[in-house]
Image (cartoon, rainbow, N blue to C red):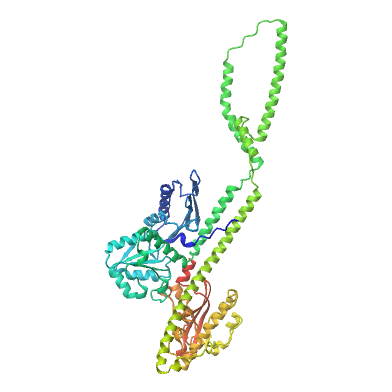
Amino acid sequence: MEQTPRPRPAHLDYESFWTTEEQPGWLDRVLDQAATWLRDRLHLDLDLSVDGEVRSPDHSKRAQTLHRTASKSRGVRLRVRNANRDGTFIVTVLAVESLRGGWLQITVTCSDPSRVVRKPAVADQFLDVVEFADVTALRSQAEYTSVEGLEALEALIGSPDRRLPVIVAAPLDDVPFDSWNALVDRWTTQTAGIAHVISLAPPAAQEFASRHRLHAVLPGTLRTYPAGADLSDPLTAKTARWLSHRSLAGDDKAVAKTIGSFVRQHAASQPLSLPSAAREWSRAFDRIASGKLRAAVTPAPVSLSERHELFATRQRELAELRQTPALQNDESARTAPPVPEPSAAPVSTLQEIEHLRRELVASQAALAASTQKLRTVQETLMLDGIDEESLLGLLELATRTVPDQSAIDTLLDTNDSLQNRIEGLEEDVLTERSDKIEARKALSRLEDDYGRARREIEYLRSKVAEHSPEAAYSFTEQGAPQNPLGECPATWEMLADRRDLSDHVIILTASVKKIKDLETVDADGSALTAAWDALGTLAAYRNAVCAGTWDRDVHDFCESGPLGQFRVPPNKHSRGETGSTKQDNRYRKARLLPVPSSVEESGMVHMWAHFKPYMWTREKRLRIHYSDQVTSDGAIYVGHVGEHLPSASTSKLHR
């Protein structure tokens, strides 16, 4: 019984995605390097400036180039298959050049489900001729950073646009810095294009440690900061993983392999989906390749009249070739010496000659008839001649096995259907991955909060026990606090019309239509419940402020509000937006939301604080933006209840 092949883990592949802001022309330099790589490494000669395909004599190596133009961008996909004793390796280079730069993607995979593929040599070649970047420029070797460069490093680690992990290396005190750098270069040779590698100078390493303590890197170690890391977030202490002294001990090749595998596993555990434009280009090239496959196996229909016309054209060409020798023969016949008249002969001889003449005439008539029949056969079969070569060619065509075209069409249609299905499943996988990542982060944060809360409880209990042991251990479960707004409405439309919100002076100024439209997105009502809990938190917060039991903001209320007060966890709330979102006029304008003119004469205020109650997919999340005016007029104004407003992070997802 055949076993189902094991799926290949993603971290075994080499996957990179780079951007560039260089002027048009960089793609030609990339293609030149790719052509050189094909010739030198695989002994394949292929013109990459046009669509084409080439194979090695034994068919173990094959390369195909496809081109596509869309709007003002031009793209090229190079796909190379190399089969050897270690398996079949597939290298795909997809590059798109636009007027403002472009991007390049490299993917290398292998048919062996357990083999780690090495970095392709062409990756270094690309980085040497084009300034590719992932927020900052990418290098084929480690970049050395002094104290003056720490701010740039911190900005890189904290950038919301970064896709690749950052490896930071801190030197050992008793090892010369140049020797340490040489080690870092050798160790990280397989990470070019899939990670930023920063080697800190000794003073920079000390300053970095003093600034970030638990989030910094220890001497003689490497630390990997994943995309989305925040040096001020306690969770970074868990997500930024170490390569300790023990991991770095031993043979340099083994260490390089360990680091390469470590980086890939780290990236695979927190993958970022490609920009939508990159996915669209990839699928477009898949469709082009499918179209070429269909054209290759589908015979081009040629009508009988077209076949006759082609045959007639060939016959005219052959007749013109024969005309010159025929004219020469006629001239020779005219200049030939006259044939002497036969001398008188006996009667019997004359009779015999006459008999032979009659037989000759009959033979010539029979020959003419046979020749006409052969000509008819030749024209009917459309043969250029009746020689052995032409007849053998006809025999080959007549005896060739012709595949069932309807079966071929069925296979091709099935292939197209499966390709469409794969595209849909890829989107589902991306969604599931992003959901898993967010859930893992939320779980880690909750575990961290839980551990800190437990330690705080134990500390406070010990202090209480010093004065009243009975009180320290007298707690009994009273049940979770109830939402002060009461039962959650059944539909989003009912939420938009709930009058009891205004009873708690929670004023909805948000678009009622946008709120009602959430009904089509929120299939099971989970987001509705989460939104109601967020609004209930605002009501509880307002009650506490008005009662004089709370004097801090909503976020602090979520973290450590008065005992017994209803509230959502602090990871469901944000005090404000990132700096990149606040600095962009488009994003600022999106958060300029309505309030009564009694609050602001213009009727609009920026609502930076927001709840993030629910996520349907990575690209579709629920947000509630509000303006806290409890200390001025006693009200809280909710200006947006709907999907995530445009921001630096969401525009990155849709690029």
User: Position of 68 compared to 380: left or right?
Assistant: left
User: Residue at (46%, 50%) from the top-left corner?
Assistant: 49
The picture places residue 324, in percent across and down from the top left corner, at: 56, 25
Please count the marks in the image: 0
Height in image: 333 above or below 582?
above
Height in image: 278 above or below 217?
above
**Depth check: 314 or 33 in front?**
33
Q: Is residue 21 in view from this perspective?
A: no
The picture places residue 197, in percent across and down from the top left corner, at: 36, 64
User: Position of 24 compared to 528: left or right?
Assistant: left
Q: Is residue 644 in view from this perspective?
A: yes
**Depth check: 288 or 563 in front?**
563
**Depth check: 329 or 356 in front?**
356
Height in image: 337 above or below 586?
above
The picture places residue 219, in percent across and down from the top left corner, at: 32, 69
Q: Quadrant of residue 529?
A: bottom right
User: Position of 576 compared to 171: left or right?
Assistant: right
**The N terminus sits in image quarter:** bottom right
**Depth check: 385 or 227 in front?**
227
The picture places residue 569, in percent across and down from the top left corner, at: 48, 81
Height in image: 478 above or below 646?
below
